[in-house]
Each structure stands twice: as C-alpha cells, then as structure tokens.
Amino acid sequence: MESTDLTHYKALVAKLPQLRKEIGKVIVGQQEAINEVLISLLAGGHCLLEGVPGLAKTLMVKTMSDALAMRFKRIQFTPDLMPGDIVGTEILEDDHETGRKVFVFNQGPIFANVVLADEINRTPPKTQAAMLEAMQEYKVTYGGNDYALPKPFLIIATQNPIEQAGTYPLPEAQLDRFLLYIKLSYPSQEEELNVLKSTTGTSRPVLETILSDKDIIELQSLTRQVHISEELIDYINRLVRASRPDGSPSAFVKQWGEWGAGPRAGQALVLCAKARAVLSERFSVIPEDIQTLAYPILRHRIALNFRAEAEGITTDRVIQELLNTVK
C-alpha cells in the first residue's frame, strides 16, 4: 500500500468513531450491536437482528443509513407478501417513440443501499427465498434479465424471538447467508433512564452525514487488505472444524452438537475480524477480534441435538466451550 493511499485510508478510518458518535445521538446503548452491524457493512455481508419489540431495531438501522447518506428501504414481512413485492415487477407502459405497449421493469424496495427486512420469519419460504439471489449475487433476475443492485448493499433482517405461532423459521441454507446473527438485549437501568429522558420531549437530534457510499466502498476494499497472520488463520480453521461433532476435540460439542459450521463460517470469521480491526483503527487482526466475533458468526451455523434443547443448552454455551478448548 502506497503512503498516499495509507494517508487517505487513515483519514477515512478516523471517521468511524465519529460515525458511532452520530448514531449514539439517537440510539442509547446497544454499542455492541451497533459495532456488529458496522462490521457487517465493512465486511460486505448481511446480518440478522433478533430482539424483543421495542429495542429500537428499526430506528438503529434508519439512523445508521442517515449518518451514511445511503438510500434506505424498509420491507414489512407479512404472510401475504409476494416475491414481486420485494424484487419488483413488470408494468405495461406506452412507448412514446413507437406508440406500442411495452413491459417495463419497476424496481422493488430491494433496490436500495440498506434494506431492512422487518420480521422476516413472518412470511412464507417462497417470499423469503426471493432474497437469496440478492443477498449472494447482488443482483435480481426477472424475465430473463439481470438487474444489478446498488453498491454498497446491506440487508438487515429482524425477527422476534417471542410469538412464534404462525411464523416460518428461516431454513439453514438461508441462515448461512447471513454473515452475523446479532442478539439485542434489554438496556441497562441507566441506559433505559436516558431513553425515557431523551425520547419524550420536543427536541430531536440533527444527524450529520459522516461517510458517503463511495467512502464505504473504499473502506470495504481496505478491510480485505488488513493483515492477518498465518497463525490466526490456522486458529480460525481449527475453531470452525472443532464445532463439528465428528472428530471435535471438545467432549461438550460431541455430547450436544448435531452438526457444525461449514467453510463459509471460516471465511466470515476472517473477513469480520479484519472489519473489527478497521473499526478499532487498526490494520492488523488480533486474537480478541476472532474470539469476540465467534458468537455472532457461529451461533446460527451450529445445530444442537434434541437432548441439548431439552436441557436448555444454547449455541452460545457451545461456542464458549469451543473457545475454552481450542487454543
């Protein structure tokens, strides 16, 4: 990397703490979740947010979009939502030059930089699957034609952990497409007190635009250039392989695991560790990056057996045992 490029990148990276500060004007607390969403953006992946109602999931995503000057769209998933409501559909229009009727593709809400798929588990699998190509290929195919999605492109899906009656749990193949599975917890007493004070008056914070879409694309390029040692790549490889019950060095995994994470989990750990380094204004990955991100990266890529579910064993507990076993 040339010195001029390094100076430019350092100036961009220096804006990331300011970005978090701007988001903090609206969102009180939830710093870990905010960091993980930003990591997903820098790594060029998508994330799944899970939390009970009222934890400001939608507001968090909207606020981040405003501070990044990126086009934001929200899709409310319902049982009667159709694939065309997401990707778009063809409409019949008059061609003013020829006077003939022609079909024109009308882009759906998926054509935005940040797409909030609200309560994604409330729509049938056919509609959920409409997002698969967009998430993986960054394009939409309709009527035999390909339509490129804007860059940067980030899907943030939310789901409610309660009221599971009438929902459609995401299949494992689609869950694996999400780079991170982020769980939101209740705020602390002090944070909740600040929420009550700051959101029930007349004042509304004014957000500044910190980074443009072009800046994000450059930061995504920088993320892939961050240094990671061969020893840490080997550590990630051993960690992912240890999550598989067959041949795992962890007796805990062998006892409670049904199946473990695939190679995509290792790729996600490398990329997200690099993104966390950039977010921390570093240009090299450290073990803490990997150990912190193991939870949101692996928790939806590990399946537990029926006995584990009956005993109340969670995937986070399995990941903790993995981190204790694999050195």
Image (cartoon, rainbow, N blue to C red):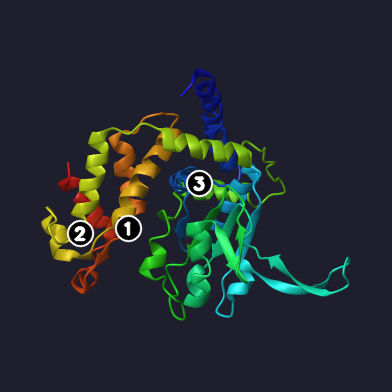
- The vertical placement of 151 against 214, above or below, is below
What is the three-letter code of the residue carrying label 1?
A: Arg
- The vertical placement of 197 against 177, above or below, is above
* Residue positioned 61% across, 48% down in the render: 65
Circle 1 or circle 3, nearest the eye: 3
Q: Quadrant of residue 73?
A: bottom right
Near mark 2 (Cα within 10 A), the count class, few <14, some 14-19 or many ≥20, is: many
* Residue 326 percent coordinates (x, y): 17, 45
| Secondary structure at numbered mark 2 | loop
| Secondary structure at numbered mark 1 | loop
Q: Is residue 55 visible?
A: no
* 160 on left or right of 295: right
- Check contact, mark 2 vs mark 3: CB within 8 A: no
* 158 on left or right of 211: left
Near mark 1 (Cα within 10 A), the count class, few <14, some 14-19 or many ≥20, is: many
- Residue hosting label 3: 41
Q: Earlier in the sequence, mark 1 or mark 3?
A: 3
* Residue 195 percent coordinates (x, y): 56, 49
Instruction: Estimate the spatial distance between the alpha carbons at disc 2 and disc 1, rounded to whole Å.
Output: 13 Å
